[in-house]
Image: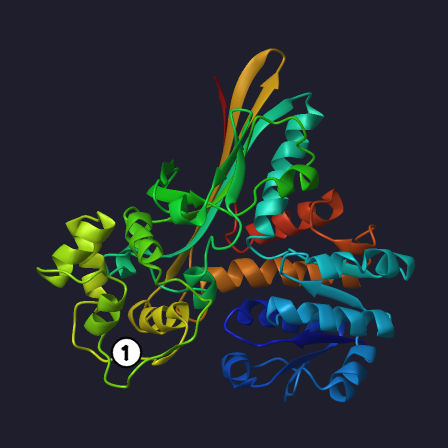
Amino acid sequence: MKQILVLGAGRSSLFLIEYLAKYADQEQYQLLVCDKDVQYASSHIKGYSSISFANIDIFDEAAVLPLIQNSSVVVSLLPAALHIHIAKWCLQAHKHLATASYVSDEMKALHQEAESKGLIFLNEIGLDPGIDHMSAMKMMDEIRAKGGVIDGFKSYCGGLVADEDDGENPWKYKFSWNPRNVVLAAQGAPAMFLEQGQLKLTPYHQVFAHPITFDIPQYGQLEAYPNRDSLKYIELYHLHGVKDMVRGTFRKPGYCKAWQVFVELGICDDSQVLNLSSDMTMKDWLCMYLPSGQGSLESRLMQHTHCSEAEVEKLKYLGFFSNDLLPLHKGSSAQILEEVLKIKWKLEANDKDLVVMLHKIHYNLNGQAHTQIASMVLKGESNTHTAMAKTVGLPLAIGVKLILENKISEKGVLAPVFEDIYLPVLEELKSFGIDFIENDLPL
């Protein structure tokens, strides 16, 4: 009996597991889902004869390697840093692997060995990365096929909350994916991109200070900040010679300037562990980051960061001027902030999330300049069956099916930028409501 092995069963796993369970039932596969705690997934997914769940220590090679050896393909939904360990076990066992995570340098180094063994290590086939690659490559390959020459590419994506579920939250944001990634967003190397043929570097302390505003077709207005490194996609997308190359992240209007207050204060710092007293309040914590002075805490904050009353109101919503006790007393500033936000930015039982993606491609065809725009807006079904889980899990699941059906000709460590991957995945995603509206505008 052929087996599909899924490692990882967290909040982003439900759509993938349901899809693969249906496929396994039809094709007489067995689907084994493993994690340190599979209760979340097993409680939501029932009624499939092919599926079984097992609690397992992912670090226990003696337990995991036999499961890999008995499988046709391994799906890793584990934290990205753990993929390399699974990949090495897959090489040892001569098994295919699929993940939704970025290709790390360590994973890339396995390409030649995986290719020589006829294995597919398919990565970056989720939402971002994933649907962004596939939808962009489809557009660009179609433009090139008719003789167009691309000279600019801009792409933005955001995991948000549906407008009707913003509630009283002035940030207009709730977590639909890893909170830690949100808190640490844009840290590290400066944001690098091309603008009108010039290399631009935006250091972390300025990334959120000057967001760009967009009007999204059939949605409305959003703002965006640049991602860390847009230049690496020039090679992946075959865009040598373009004048504009930018990738960024969407947020609702007002978010970025309020987040900039945290950046300026240093509250997003993750480098130093703090040991704070158990009776420290939110107000006390905020005072740590401000110079001593006269006046209210609000006025001192505004004077120190030059923020407006709108940003003060957003921090007030999070409790920063209150006598509430800190939810965490030992950890980095970023970890403490994460715990605060997990309380205030939680998706409630009836909340729905929102995923928005936009591509803008500038090209020339027969002496005429064009801009092609493609946008995708998807609302979640519930706080468990989210748009984020859907757009991460379904492309990955369809990619697994393509591997099992021997429909991917390339071998080695791959991203989904090949036609035999992106065309069938994008076509099937339409049946799940994941589709792009495209407009080509001559200039």
Q: Relative to residue 194, is residue 255 depicted above or below?
A: below
Q: How far across and how far down the image is residue 286, in percent? A: 24, 67
Q: Nearer the viewer, residue 298 or 19?
A: 298
Relative to 405, residue 231 above or below: above
Q: Residue furthest left?
A: 295
Which amino acid, by three-letter code, is at mark 1? Leu
Q: Up-down: is 405 above or below 44?
A: above
- Above or below: residue 414 compared with residue 148: below
Give x and y (percent) for residue 408: 79, 53
Q: Is residue 76 visible?
A: no
* Quarter of the image where the N terminus is located: bottom right
Residue lying at the far front of the rendered structure: 292
User: In this image, 90 relative to 433: left or right?
Assistant: right
Q: Residue furthest top?
A: 367
Residue 58 in sight from this viewpoint: yes
Question: Quadrant location of residue 321?
Answer: bottom left
Q: Is residue 195 left or right of residue 299?
A: right
Q: Residue at x 50, y 44 (%)?
A: 191
Q: How is the image coloured?
A: rainbow
On the rendered structure, is 9 left or right of 3?
left
Q: Quadrant of residue 76?
A: bottom right
> Residue 279 versus residue 353: which sits nearer the camera?
279
Q: Can you identify the residue that label 1 sits on?
A: 326
Depth order, front residue of 427/119: 119
The spot of residue 359 in percent (x, y) is: 51, 38
Question: Residue 319: x, y in percent?
Answer: 21, 69
Residue at (83%, 54%) from the top-left corner?
411
Classify residue 92 as left or right of residue 221: right
Is residue 297 or residue 177 the one in the foreground? 297
Residue at 58 percent of width and 63 percent of height: 393
**Kind of element beneath mark 1:** loop
